[in-house]
Image: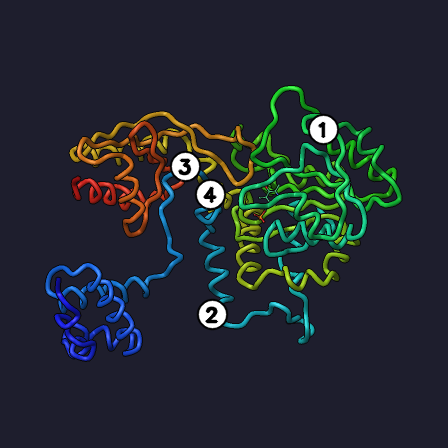
Amino acid sequence: MPSSRSIPSIDALLQRPELRPALDRYGRTAVVDAVRAAADTWRRAPEGDAADAIIAAAGARLAAGDRASLRPVLNATGVLIHTNLGRAPLARGAVDAAAAVSSGYANLEYDLDAGGRGHRHQHAERLLVDLTGADAAVVCNNNAAATLLTLAALAAGREVVVSRGELVEIGGGFRVPEILAQSGATLREVGTTNRTRISDYAAAISDRTGLLLRVHPSNFRIEGFTERPALADLTALGRRFSIPVFEDQGSGWLGLDGGPAWPDALRAEPSVRQSLADGADLVAFSGDKLLGGPQAGLVAGRSALLDRLRRHPLMRALRADKQTYAALEATLRLWRRPPAWPEIPLVRMLLATTGEIGARAEAVANRLRPALEAAVVDGHSTIGGGSAPQSVLPTRLVAASSAAVSAAALEARLRASDPPVIVRVQDDRVLLDLRTVHPEGDDVVTQAILDAVALGN
Ligand SMILES: *Cc1c(COP(=O)(O)O)cnc(C)c1O
């Protein structure tokens, strides 16, 4: 058992020429820390020459610490709005707009005409109004913030009537009853999990009622004996009692016509414009789901109610930053021009045909074949992001397997590659859905698999 005496002193190690570049790059303190940590590790499991092993391990430690924690990955899962992988990729124009305001100053709260203080609320509002038919709109951090702010501004200290069937938990721990409690409003549940009628809402209304809430059930579905009133019936009830109706729509589907035909999978999605036309006073939705923009929460609807949101103290805590406004406006400008829609990556992925995806899959499979078994098979992409669970798109998958490496090992190696490639595993095969990979990424994915297989067992 080697004693600590067989390890050169830290000072002696720091004199070694191999550490010179690290000292220049990271500075003495960081290198000393890394060498100490590497020496401790070596002492617990000594192997090979102490100095060489410690210097190599310290170098690796420093490089790992220098690598960003948040990195781009290739999403070959076929889940379009993948919450764990950062949801919607931004359009080039949105990235450029965010970069342009990031590297310098911007008129975020400055009125360029008057030459004085302006309001950040002005940005993106006109575009949101045009695209949804609302009177006005407010932008927050995300849709959870938008919902919290709306409930706090309109219903704190009062009752919010909501169907039991809509008291759901959405991915990432967004629980409708908990957000409601945080807003200071009181939950007034009506109906049952599977059936709620308009008469249930009517019976719950009293002078304590502040709001009627409607929640998109997201990726949750009850099958069979179910019922909930049409939104138009709920808004008619709200008008009769002068109580605003607020819909948390989540997905943010604009439902615009005039461009390419949308896939059937989106038929089940309510559109913001339709909900407002059906009489909803306010509709909240995410910026980075079906809108295909940056993380944001948007509330569209009546001016007078939105003024109350803007004036609420929480608005200050939940407001969006300049990069978000810039990327959001750029995305909304693309939505205003149907020929530009495919510039939004989410739209391009929604519209990609099985023919296009299949041709790319065949090309990838051909290049993989000498190294492993690769077939192109039918499958489904998932829209995700709280859209209806049956919202799937037919796709063509590359199904790859190797006698030498298990699918689980292949998946782990792809995840460890640079950039990481995230795939599905099924029946001991790795499944690649190129719908969610930018066509320029096909070669990277192919090479990553060839490299992973070449590592052998
Ligand atoms: C996704 C979703 C939310 C949460 O939105 P974030 O933008 O993630 O904050 C809230 N409500 C519904 C119905 C959703 O689908």
User: Relative to residue 428, is residue 87 depicted above or below?
Assistant: below
Quarter of the picture containing the N terminus is bottom left
Callout 3 crowding tier (Cα within 10 Å): few <14, some 14–19, many ≥20: many
Indicate if the residue with disc 2 has its beta carbon within 8 Å of ligand 1: no
Q: Secondary structure at mark 2?
A: loop
- Amino acid on which disc 4 is placed: His
- Amino acid on which disc 2 is placed: Ser
According to the image, what is the colour scheme of the structure?
Answer: rainbow
Q: Which residue is mark 2?
A: 103
Q: Secondary structure at mark 4?
A: loop
- Calculate the distance from the C-alpha at mark 2 to the C-alpha at mark 1: 53 Å
- Calculate the distance from the C-alpha at mark 3 to the C-alpha at mark 4: 9 Å
Q: Which residue is mark 3?
A: 78
Left or right: 426 in relation to 92:
left
Q: Which residue is mark 4?
A: 82
> Could you say where residue 99 lies in the image, as x and y percent from the top left?
47, 63
> Could you say where residue 28 lies in the image, as x and y percent from the top left?
27, 78
- Calculate the distance from the C-alpha at mark 2 to the C-alpha at mark 3: 34 Å
Q: Which residue is mark 1?
A: 192
Which comes before the other along the chain, label 4 or label 1?
4
